[in-house]
Image (cartoon, grey):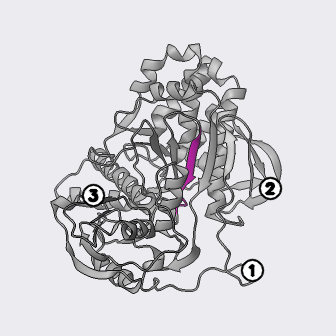
Amino acid sequence: MLVATTATAVLAGTGLAWSVERDFDSGFTHSTALGTDAPRSVGGAVNILLIGLDTRKDLDGNDLPREVLEQLHAGDGTEGGYNANSLILLRIPADKSKVVAFSIPRDDYVTVTGIPGYQQIKIKEAYGLKKAAVQAKLIEQGEKDPVVLERRGREAGRASIVTAVRDLVGVPIDRFAEISLAGFYDLATAVGGVDVCLEHAVDDSEFSGAIFPAGRQHLDGSQALAFVRQRHGLLNGDLDRTHRQQAFLTSVAKSLRDSGTLTNLSRLAELMNVAHRDMVLSDGWNLFDFARDLGSAGSVPVEFHTLPVVRYDVIDGQDVNIVDPAAIKREVRAAFGQEVPTITTTAPTPTSVVDIHNVGALPGQAATLSVALTNRGYGAGLIGDGDSSDGPYSALTYGLGAADDARALAEMLGGLPFSASPSVADGRIEVVLGADFTLPLELSPTTPTTTAPPTTAAGSVPVPDAGKPVSTTIGDTIPCVN
């Protein structure tokens, strides 16, 4: 998580840290799940995905020790799956002037590819479903070693969750760090507990074990895990839980600065052991060098956001968050300082004809999009599958006279990249729909068939509230949350 990076940044600023640099970096498990052909950030900025994995297993698939499971208040090793219950995407610009982080609610209902039998799921499920599918295939091929099955399955799960997040937010992912459920507990314990501030008293003894009064208080490792896991009984459910995760990260960073952890050899060794035992890093990421570089920037401001949710709903008996991927892409790109097509206040009637090539989107998406664009004044062009010349990712190219229409269309589709091309005929736009494409809700012909959404005691549907951005400084103030 961010706190591991932050903690290492603090660690890297001490003379004591230099003596353990080699041992620190060599102890991590690394993953190749990012792949080699995925888009990457340019200009020195880095986008990092932090994955909190809700599993009661270690990296080899063994149940965690019973004494650890008892502290987690999370059942035994047979409960839970491999849900990515905590997802935070953060951007560190080249000048390290400010870290911008987006929490991604785990129940966001998204389109996915590459998971047999599924086209739309809660984003948290992208890890576990892919892992299960790959393991089943390996078993069919005769693989029997449980450690091999676990490791190869989890590598596939990591690649799947990275792809799902990248497709939703529309920006590159350059690095990732995965931390297990036990990692939250181990980390909070290693730093001597964390301080939190609650707006209201809570009693969630039936589920997470969170029983806390209102106000500022100090939590041990077990209590800290309950604090970040609680979602029942909160005003905004999982959205409030994302705010708690943000507060937890800030609190651990502050605890590292205020406590004697970084000058205490035994505590320092324990912190290193936690990172090695509970974290997996993307291949090629030297966390110590990275953190030393970040630490040299001093007290870096951090701004936490939560991806917006359009509404709550129930699909196939599951509570889900309905989101607008196009709006999410615009918001993330704007917050990350990336170019976002400008929105004209008086958009003229389009005159261009739009051809659509499907190179990886869901079947039928090209036809659906064509109808939607025709209804908005664009000319209906050719529809069909693309080829290798189109590339694997969603984009627009346009011919002479179609620049304004292409710009408006790129914005409508969530800020897709667009450019002029001499191979496109005058007055025409070519849209390539890759696996990263999700049709904006405003262009969907119908909404999913659902049952009645959950209601409040008063009988009204709760309105999603992502909250205002949480602004702080690494290791500084502790925000109060629900």
Return the disc, 1 or 2, that comes first in the chain's sequence.
2
Q: Position of residue 414 (x, y in %)?
A: 44, 65
Looking at the image, residue 265 lies above or below residue 465 = above
Image coordinates of residue 60 in percent, x first then y, are 36, 43
Q: CA distance from mark 1 to mark 2?
A: 21 Å
Q: Which dot marks residue 185?
A: none
- Residue 103 part of the magenta-drawn span: yes
Position of residue 375 measured from the top left corner of the image (x, y, whole percent): 39, 86
Residue 323 among those drawn in magenta? no
Left or right relative to 16: residue 151: left
* Residue that badge 1 annotates: 457
Q: Residues within 10 Å of mark 3 (few under 14, many from 20)?
A: many
- Residue 66 visible within the image: no
Q: Which residue is mark 2?
A: 199
The answer to whether any part of residue 44 appears in the image is yes
Mark 1 vs mark 3: give the one in front: 1
Mark 3: which amino acid? Val
Q: Residue at x 23, y 51 (%)?
A: 144
- Picture coordinates of residue 64 (x, y %)? 48, 45
Work out which residue is located at the far front of the displayed protein and give it.
401
Q: Nearer the viewer, residue 455 or 307?
A: 307
Question: In the image, what residue type sits under mark 2?
Answer: Glu
Q: Which residues are magenta?
A: 98-106
Indicate which label's residue lies in the foreground, 1 or 2.
Answer: 2
- Which quadrant would residue 15 be assigned to in this image? top right
Say which element carries label 3.
helix
Q: Which residue is mark 3?
A: 134
Between the residue at mark 2 and the residue at mark 3, the CA separation in whole angstroms equals 44 Å
Considering the numbered disc 1 on the image, is that residue within a helix, a strand or a loop?
loop
Front-most of residues 277 and 365: 365
N-terminal of the pair, mark 1 or mark 3, is 3
